[in-house]
Image: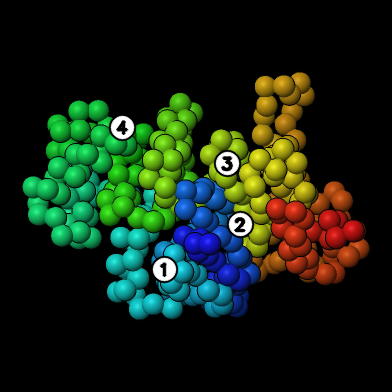
Amino acid sequence: MTPPILSVRDLRVAFATRRGVLSAVDGVSFDIAQGEVLGVVGESGAGKSVTGAAVMGLIDLPGRITGGEIFLAGRRIDNLPPETMRRIRGKRIGPIVKDSLASLDPLYRIGDQLIETIRTHTDLARPAARRRAIELLAEVGIPAAERRIDAYPHEFSGGMRQRVVIALALCAEPDLVIADEPTAALDVSTQAQIIALLKRLVRDRGMAVMLITHDMGVIADTADQVAVMYAGRIAEIGPARDIVQNPFHPYARGLMGAVPTLAQNAGRLAQIPGAMPRLSELPPGCPFHPRCPHAVARCRLDRPEPLRRGARAVACHLTDR
């Protein structure tokens, strides 16, 4: 069997603060195969983006990876020198960020930014790199790419800028794309277009995608596998269809209960009471127990470890029966 494109084993990321060392990611493990989308979902502060940043080698001081291993196509990458990791990040891993304005230089034309990225990671001359840039813009759905390549970022709508960001991520034909909230701040129709584009690219190119989001609707429509994160740990991971239709972990059930459906007759959506604890104030036992309607005494004392349940792994004492 071929190794997964991305394999993360017991990843731990900590930040040194005045309040002590805080664990932002605590023992996270998952695989992403070629042509597969892993959706990483959870509330703000769950550790989703920090996990993605760790995979890309973008954890800066006072943060650092304190444990675990990260493998890209069988090669360990979490212990590489920064310059080596920078080359891998540009060529083998393509980042898609949620803030397109922050990732595009407003002083340079779109084409210049694409051409520079292509030439950095390939041996193409500038004319060939320009042709490649036009092809990428057309592939991600930019109309009249031959003309729009010479436009500036401010001349594009939010949805079109996000397509340009996706084109930048594809410049070196990466094995893995890490998309961090790629539909944030976009209207619903544009969100649907961006998600459809990602699905098509995965199908046509066979990339592996780590899709970070807080939107369970996006996960249900896009992901093959889902990792539900809470307070720096994975609460439940498994096939997207199974988790969307029948989540085991109470937190995953709460997330799915908050998604409106056409068949729903209730006047109010379900909600999860309380808020995610601060990293400096994590409760003993299961970190979700203060918000869990099914918590028992064991939940308040012992931290649950992930247990296999068929194709899934669930970190919940309630499933250990």
Residue appearing at x 15%, y 33% in the figure: 146
Classify 10 Å Cα crowding around label 4: few (below 14), some (14-19), many (20 and above): some
Quarter of the image that includes the C terminus = bottom right
**Circle 1 is placed at which residue position?**
57
Q: Position of residue 176 (x, y in %)?
A: 41, 55
Label 1–label 2 contact, CB within 8 A: no
Q: Which mark is residue 141?
A: 4
Q: Which mark is residue 46?
A: 2
Secondary element type, mark 1: loop
Q: Position of residue 119 (x, y in %)?
A: 17, 57
Q: Quadrant of residue 233?
A: bottom right
Q: Distance between the Cα atoms at labels 1 and 2?
A: 19 Å
Label 4–label 3 contact, CB within 8 A: no
Colour scheme employed for the rendering of this structure: rainbow
Q: Position of residue 127 (x, y in %)?
A: 8, 47
Which amino acid type is marked by label 2? Ala
**Circle 3 is placed at which residue position?**
219
Q: Earlier in the sequence, mark 1 or mark 2?
A: 2
Label 2–label 3 contact, CB within 8 A: no
